[in-house]
Amino acid sequence: MIRVVLILAAFFTLTLLLAPFQMIALAFDLRLQRSIPHLCHRVLCALIGVRIRQVGRRSDARPTLILSNHVSWLDICVISALSPVAFVAKSEVAGWPVFGWLAKLQRTIFINRKARHQTGAATREIAGRLLGGDAVVLFAEGTSSDSTRVLPFRSSLVGAVGRG
């Protein structure tokens, strides 16, 4: 229990220290806005004892769209610890206490899955990020799984980005 409290205190302190710099970087569109979440997730993974073993080499090519399975919240920490990325998430995440704010600081692209007519706007935002040099992570299953199976990919955004 003490370890959990110490980890939460360290994460809270890290967030309080880095959040103002991230807000400034976002306000002035500084490249630093990509690096701060990457650093934060690297530190968080170290704090909670996650050892990341990468097999193969990530592409340095841009634009890069990364399709991933989504097993748990830890996926976000690990993927972002490996490389500066922007995530695509359902719009409901933006309203979640604490995590919604953190997702906004991470520069997450929020998608309203219930409003199919907004797919074009979401596609344009993803395409803009890709063309701006971001690596964008899309959890193509549209949700997290129980990690025992791969859920079907929801290809509407993937296909739309490919045409964009």
Image (cartoon, rainbow, N blue to C red):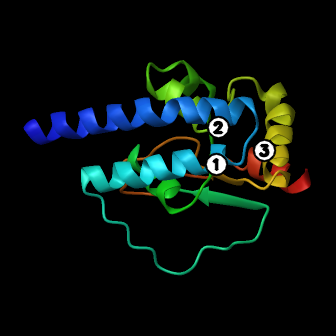
Please tell me how crowded label 3 is: few (under 14), some (14-19), or many (20+) other residues with Cα within 10 Å: many
Observer-side mark, 2 or 1, equals: 1
Which quarter of the rendering shows the N terminus? top left
Q: Could you tell me which residue is drawn at 84 percent across and 26 percent down?
A: 117
Above or below for 101 versus 103 = above
Please tell me how crowded label 1 is: few (under 14), some (14-19), or many (20+) other residues with Cα within 10 Å: many
Observer-side mark, 3 or 1, equals: 1
Kindly report the distance in space between the C-alpha atoms of the residues bearing marks 3 and 1: 15 Å
Q: Nearer the viewer, residue 14 or 7?
A: 14
Q: Secondary structure at mark 2?
A: loop
Above or below for 80 versus 125 = below
Find disc 3 in the rendering and name its residue.
126
Q: State yes or no: discs 2 and 3 in contact (Cβ < 8 Å).
A: no
Find disc 1 in the rendering and name its residue.
34
Kindly report the distance in space between the C-alpha atoms of the residues bearing marks 2 and 1: 8 Å
Reading the chain from its start, which is encountered first: label 2 or label 1?
1
Q: Nearer the viewer, residue 52 or 110?
A: 52
Image location (x, y in percent) of residue 125: 81, 38
Image location (x, y in percent) of residue 77: 44, 49
Find disc 2 in the rendering and name its residue.
107
